[in-house]
Image (spheres, rainbow, N blue to C red):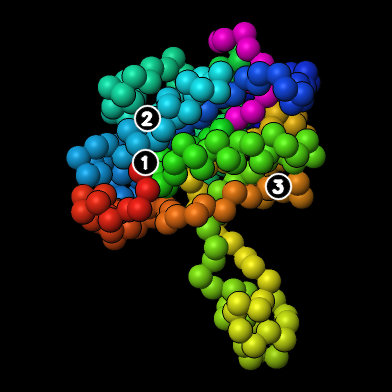
Amino acid sequence: MISGKPRKISSILNFDNGIEMNLLITICARGGSKGIPGKNIRKLAGKPLIGYSIDTAMAFASGQNGDVVLSTDDEDIRAVASGFGLETAYQRPEHLATDAAGKIDTISDLLLFQEAASGKTYDYVLDLDVTSPLRTQEDLQKAFGIIRSDEGAVNLFSVNAAARNPYFNMVEVQENGYYGTVKKGSFLTRQSAPKVYDLNASFYFYRRSFFLEGYRSAITDRSLIYEMPHICFDLDHPVDFEFLSFLLEQNKLDFSL
């Protein structure tokens, strides 16, 4: 039992054989951000940050037999979400609203709540991270197709090609006190080294089996990736927020949200 609640995830599994799947789209936004105070509802190019994820979720849900749900402990966030048409009866419990609370536990608890409330069994969960909004409907559609085509995969997460490569230009201290590459190889150029990726924290698809089998991290032994063909980054620091505001306000993105 992942969340510590007296509810269990059903063991009924539905596999893709051309049949319609039930999809739950989760948006998790707690209050009390320290890096960028109030960032989940802070205006970004005139629109509350959470609004970008809600609009994206609603649009994707409409074509995928999906339901959109919110997990928050903050009444201001709840009110802003309501203004975008996302109402919820779910209240995130205190033990899942701390800095130490894991995202997987938070999603699992919301999944359990929504299944009990709706009477549905969800085959997939799509989690949209509020602080990494640069994703498109095409990204989600292609990524959903990737995980649905691989029955062995338990989840998928969005990535970008990494600017630094641990085989070539990332170093760490060695046993002798000197520094060497993080991963060993005899590569003379970054292009000749194995390709590596940065998780951009924008979205994650989970199969039901991910929760049934008790995974605690999004990076598993059966994970897939979707490489975004455009810029995407997480808003961790105030400068990130300012940078994205500039890109949006000056129409510098080469894609539409």
From the viewer's perspective, is residue 16 above or below residue 216?
above
Marks 2 and 3, how far apart at CA: 27 Å
- Do residues under tags 3 and 1 come within 8 Å of each other at their CB atoms? no
| Structural crowding at the residue carrying mark 3, measured as other residues with C-alpha within 10 Å and reported as few (<14), some (14–19) or many (≥20) | some
Which residue is depicted at the point 27% across and 36% down? 48
| Structural crowding at the residue carrying mark 1, measured as other residues with C-alpha within 10 Å and reported as few (<14), some (14–19) or many (≥20) | some
Residue 66 in the magenta stretch? The answer is no
Q: Where is residue 223 in the image (x, y as percent from the top left)?
A: 70, 47
Q: Where is residue 201 in the image (x, y as percent from the top left)?
A: 50, 49
Which residue is depicted at the point 71% across and 19% down? 19
* Res. 257 mark: 1
Please provide the residue range marked out in magenta: 117-125
| Structural crowding at the residue carrying mark 2, measured as other residues with C-alpha within 10 Å and reported as few (<14), some (14–19) or many (≥20) | some
- Do residues under tags 2 and 1 come within 8 Å of each other at their CB atoms? yes
Q: Which residue matches tag 3?
A: 223
From the viewer's perspective, is residue 212 above or below residue 190?
above
Q: Is residue 156 visible?
A: yes
12 to the left or right of 132:
right
Q: What element carries label 3?
A: strand
Q: Is mark 1 on a helix, strand or loop?
A: loop
Marks 2 and 1, how far apart at CA: 9 Å
Foreground pick, 256 / 36: 256
Q: Can residue 97 be seen in this view?
A: no
- Do residues under tags 2 and 3 come within 8 Å of each other at their CB atoms? no
Q: What element carries label 2?
A: helix
**In the picture, which quadrant includes the N terminus?**
top right
Residue 215 occupies quadrant: top right
* Sequence-wise first label, 2 or 3: 2
